């Protein structure tokens, strides 16, 4: 009787194991097929994006002489991008600030004036504490202070100060 139960239990155990393996294989095939379908749906948009990038890449060798953004743009737009300003703050002195600024001149750009403004902004940043420039209101005050300093230095020749980056570490 014990032998009869053992022989009957073996086929049931094998059939349960076989059903698990078959179920796993079916689920694997369904997952692979679903991934293939979704990949086929996404791949055309990736190919079109790559095709859109190719004309842009072909235009880059034509601008091989230019590296990054020009410091002085054409006289048509009168924009001068200043060198990045990296300095520590007055308090706490272990905090650093990196600031990139561009100046919009109302007339033809003046490189000497732009360099003087760059040095003036750097000197001002060294006197600012972290508490003064915290939050959106602090950034507004900083922007207004720098605009005021530029207005005093440029005597109306610079119409706008544009912040490109502002990072505090």
Image (tube, rainbow, N blue to C red):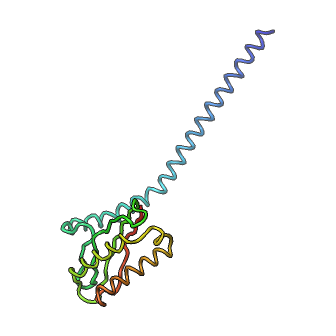
Q: Nearer the viewer, residue 169 or 61?
A: 169
* Image coords of residue 95 (percent x, y): 41, 61
Residue in view at x 61 percent, y 30 percent: 21
Residue reaching furthest right? 1
In the rendered image, residue 54, in percent from the top left (x then y), is placed at 30, 63
Q: How many marks?
A: 0
Pinpoint residue 82: horizontal percent, then vertical percent: 28, 74
In the figure, 156 relative to 26: above or below? below
Depth order, front residue of 135/6:
135
The residue that appears at 77% across and 11% down in the rendered structure is: 4
User: Quick check: 12 above or below 145?
Assistant: above
- Report the residue at 35% width, 69% height from top: 126
Which quadrant of the view contains residue 84? bottom left
Q: Quadrant of residue 68?
A: bottom left
Task: Give the residue drawn at x 20%, y 80%.
Answer: 112
* Of the pair 154 and 90, the residue shown nearer to us: 90
**Front residue (pair 148, 65):** 148
Q: Residue 51's x, y, as percent?
A: 34, 62
For the N terminus, the quadrant is top right
- The picture quadrant where one finds residue 141 is bottom left
Quadrant of the snapshot with the C terminus: bottom left
């Amino acid at each position: 009787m014990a032998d009869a139960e053992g022989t009957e239990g073996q086929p049931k155990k094998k059939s349960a194991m076989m059903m698990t393996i078959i179920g796993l294989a079916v689920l694997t095939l369904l997952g692979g097929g679903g991934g293939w379908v979704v990949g086929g749906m996404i791949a055309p948009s990736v190919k079109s994006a790559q095709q859109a990038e190719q004309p842009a890449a072909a235009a880059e060798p034509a601008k091989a002489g230019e590296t990054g953004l020009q410091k002085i743009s054409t006289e048509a737009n009168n924009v001068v991008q200043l060198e990045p300003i990296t300095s520590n703050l007055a308090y706490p002195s272990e905090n650093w600030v990196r600031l990139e600024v561009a100046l919009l001149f109302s007339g033809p750009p003046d490189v000497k004036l732009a360099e003087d403004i760059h040095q003036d902004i750097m000197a001002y940043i060294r006197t600012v504490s972290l508490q003064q420039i915290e939050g959106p209101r602090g950034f507004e005050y900083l922007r207004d202070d720098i605009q005021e300093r530029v207005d005093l230095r440029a005597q109306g020749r610079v119409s706008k100060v544009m912040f490109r980056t502002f990072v505090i570490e």
